[in-house]
Amino acid sequence: MTKRTRRTHSAAFKAKVALAAVKGDRTLAELAQQFDVHPNQITEWKRQLQERATDVFGSAGTAASEPPVDLKVLHAKIGQLTLENDFLEGALTKAGWLSAKR
């Protein structure tokens, strides 16, 4: 028995195999032989499909995983960092560590 190199499957192939497993017309062993994939991999893809099926029909406008961005906080942080950089640049220039030509 020769050792196979790791294969990467496309999302379309995974969906095709997972849908075939969800249908239940064939056993895992038959599907594994047909698609040349290990039965455990088919089971995993089937589980992922069933868990994420609700995302297909979810509301299109909202992303639950991304928190809302507060622009005021980000602008305040930019201002703070700009002040710190200016202060440090002045201190380094006075100490002779930073050339005045910059």
Image (cartoon, rainbow, N blue to C red):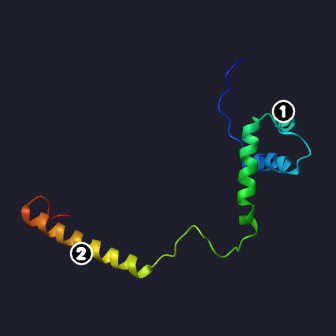
Mark 1 Cα shell of 10 Å, populated few (<14), some (14-19), many (≥20): few
Q: Is residue 71 positioned above or below 42 on the image? A: below
- Residue lying furthest bottom: 72
Instruction: Please tell me whether mark 2 sits on a helix, a strand or a loop.
Output: helix
Which dot marks residue 51?
Answer: none
| 48, above or below 85, in the image | above
Check disc 1 and report its element: helix, strand or loop: helix
Q: Nearer the viewer, residue 62 or 45?
A: 45
Q: Nearer the viewer, residue 67 or 80?
A: 67
| Residue at image coords 17%, 71% | 87
Residue 102, image x, y percentages: 20, 64
Answer whether labels 2 and 1 touch (C-beta < 8 Å). no
> Where does the image place residue 46, in percent across and percent down from the top left?
76, 49
The residue that disc 2 covers is 83
Q: Which amino acid does the dot numbered 2 rest on?
A: Leu
User: Which picture quadrant has residue 83?
Assistant: bottom left
Instruction: Tell me the CA gap for discs 2 and 1.
Output: 65 Å
Q: From the image, state whether disc 2 or disc 1 is nearer to you.
A: 1
Would residue 41 appear left or right of 28 to someone viewing this image? Answer: left
Q: Is residue 87 left or right of residue 35?
A: left
Position of residue 32 measured from the top left corner of the image (x, y, whole percent): 81, 35
Give the residue at mark 1.
33
Residue 88 is left or right of residue 18, and the answer is left
Horizontal and vertical percent position of residue 15 = 78, 50
Amino acid under disc 1:
Gln
Q: Earlier in the sequence, mark 2 or mark 1?
A: 1
Q: Residue at x 71, y 59 (%)?
A: 52
What residue is drawn where x is 70% and y is 73%?
A: 60
Q: Quadrant of residue 1?
A: top right
